[in-house]
Amino acid sequence: MDLSEAQKSDVAPATASAYLDPNYWDRRFEQEEHYEWFKDYSYFRHLILQYIKPNSAVLEVGCGNSQLSEELYRDGITELTCIDLSSIAVEKMKQRLLSKGYKEIKVLEADMLDLPFEDECFDVVVEKGTMEVDRTASDYLCNNILSAILNYPLICLYALFFVDSGDPWNPEPATVSKVMAMLEGVHRVLKPHGIFISITFGQPHFRRPFFNAPAFTWSVEWRTFGDGFHYFFYILKKGERASDSAEHAAKIDMPSITLFHEELDNEDYLFRTDLDEL
């Protein structure tokens, strides 16, 4: 087993519920230098650069130890703010960015459910794998992935917010409250006509009830990217919801799913959402 394999083994949780424990994340960030949920920047660069301009003020929520901010910086976006609830993740990211000379990027310890920013101060807010979709037989899936794939045609494992949230079609009230608190905060800090980008495995039929809540004025559309398993790239444009948009959203056909060994060889398998085509 090489070093990277050993590190993955060390940080992987025993059960999906561990993702709810802040202490788990602190321990993980102490050991792990870098991990990208839902593919790295190269897979969705062609999408994200359509919506982020060089002069955009960008907020990344739940940055963890991702290199997304570094990649955006190298593409000329320098007004970047990253937040995470883990003080360890924040401190390590600060050190890493300073070592590379990326002094303009701000990294703050903050709760995405209570964003410490003024109203209408960001052009773009990005989340990548921070709010995911619901738990169905999570412990079973964690320990028996191949059997779970064969036996659970529709599996939704919401990371963080949605672990233990109950029925994915009818999430627990506490889950709904947390998701809405995050989205309300994002909507508040976005400038007029600002854009919220959500990168996820959460399919539209689970996400749209939240995104299309009456409290929000954004339009909703999405694209997909990735090989084998496809990931969703949501674009929510504040102030651009059509008057009849309770069900309004631009979309493309749902992709089919093909299993690749390299796709299963990381934690992203925990968040597969539509396996009924296998």
Image (cartoon, grey):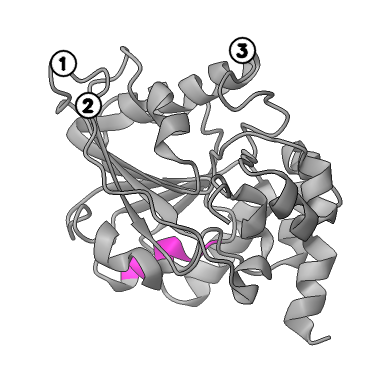
Label 3: state its secondary structure: helix
Report the residue at 49% width, 21% height from top.
181
Label 2: state its secondary structure: loop
Left or right: where 220 falls relative to 22: left
Instruction: Give the mark nearer the N terminus: 1 vs 3.
Output: 3
Q: Is residue 136 above or below residue 57?
A: above
Determine which residue is flagged by label 3.
173
Instruction: Give the mark nearer the N terminus: 3 vs 2.
Output: 3
Q: Main secondary structure of the magenta part?
A: helix
Residue furthest bottom in the image: 2
Report the residue at 40% width, 36% height from top.
204
Q: Mark 1: give few (<14), some (14-19) or many (20+) Cα within 10 Å.
A: few
- The picture places residue 132, in percent across and down from the top left corner, at 55, 40
- The picture places residue 267, in percent across and down from the top left corner, at 67, 60
Determine which residue is flagged by label 1.
244
Q: Is residue 127 above or below residue 230?
A: above
Nearer to us of marks 1 and 3 is 1
Mark 2–mark 1 distance (CA, rounded to whole Å):
7 Å
Q: Mark 3: give few (<14), some (14-19) or many (20+) Cα within 10 Å.
A: few
Kindly identify the amino acid type of the residue bearing the numbered disc 2.
Answer: His
Question: Residues in magenta?
Answer: 66-73
- The picture places residue 264, in percent across and down from the top left corner, at 66, 67
Reply yes or no: does residue 70 show up in magenta: yes
Report the residue at 61% width, 21% height from top.
175
Mark 1–mark 3 distance (CA, rounded to whole Å):
27 Å
Q: Nearer the viewer, residue 87 or 189?
A: 189
Q: Nearer the viewer, residue 128 or 61?
A: 128
Label 1: state its secondary structure: loop
Determine which residue is flagged by label 2.
248
Q: Mark 2: give few (<14), some (14-19) or many (20+) Cα within 10 Å.
A: some
Q: Are marks 1 and 3 in contact (CB under 8 Å)?
A: no
Mark 3–mark 2 distance (CA, rounded to whole Å):
25 Å
